[in-house]
Image (tube, rainbow, N blue to C red):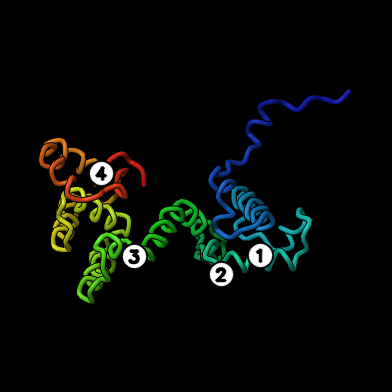
Amino acid sequence: MTKPIPIQHILTNQLPIPEKLLTSYNQLGLNETDLVVILQLYRFLYGHNNFPTPFELASILTIDEKECAKILRKLIQKNMLSIEQLENENKQLSEAYSLEPLWEKLYTTVEEKKDEQLEGTLFILFEQEFGRPLSPFEIETINTWLDEDEISPSLIKAGLRESVLMGKLNFKYIDRILREWKRKGIHTVEQARDASKKFHENQQSKTQDTRKERDTSFYYNWLEGEE
């Protein structure tokens, strides 16, 4: 009769895997084979084997050593895997794989991609709202917000939305909004939305009058929390 495996052994023989890795790996340009190599590498690292060879990894996979080495190089080139030097108490150096670049990319990639896509359309959004091509000075102003002030494209878009709601569509006013938010430590769209809601609650009658002067249907969801 086969002896049952103790439940405690099963519970302790587990590997914690970030759910986001399983649901978002394709957004990072990875396929299922890449994912399995990452999982096996993670298993080795979790078991304190800091630098498993392609042979060791391939020995438990259906791909060969050469293909495994190719995937490891790919992960390093895509900045999802790094090789670090470790020093023990005897000052001896050894190499170790690190998946920290993958975790950072995994948990920031959605917002970064969103901002990258928005940055590409930001100038178009301004031209659509102003109803004309932007001047060189206005283009430079937006670039200053992005590069020098390091304001995210999504927050700049929020400033544009706010200026529309206030009926004061001009760059000086948008700049005042963005600088005021920065002064108050507002760095996310959610924080800006909360601040805007509080302001409009105090200025509701004025806001209703100014909104009649312009069609703000494109920005209807600004205060409702949709992007």
Q: CA distance from mark 4 to mark 3?
A: 22 Å
Q: Earlier in the sequence, mark 3 or mark 1?
A: 1
96 vs 184, left or right, is right
Quarter holding residue 139: bottom left
Q: Earlier in the sequence, mark 2 or mark 3?
A: 2
What residue is shown with label 1? 71
Callout 4 touching callout 3 (CB < 8 Å) = no
46 vs 89, left or right, is right
User: Circle 1 sits in a helix, a strand or a loop, which is it?
Assistant: helix
Q: CA distance from mark 2 to mark 1?
A: 10 Å
Q: Is residue 136 placed above or below 122 in the rendered structure? A: below
Q: Looking at this view, is 107 or 138 the one in front?
A: 138
Q: Nearer the viewer, mark 3 or mark 1?
A: 3
Q: Earlier in the sequence, mark 2 or mark 1?
A: 1
Residue at the top extreme, as displayed:
1
Q: Earlier in the sequence, mark 4 or mark 3?
A: 3
What residue is shown with label 2? 77
User: Circle 4 sits in a helix, a strand or a loop, which is it?
Assistant: helix
Q: Earlier in the sequence, mark 4 or mark 1?
A: 1
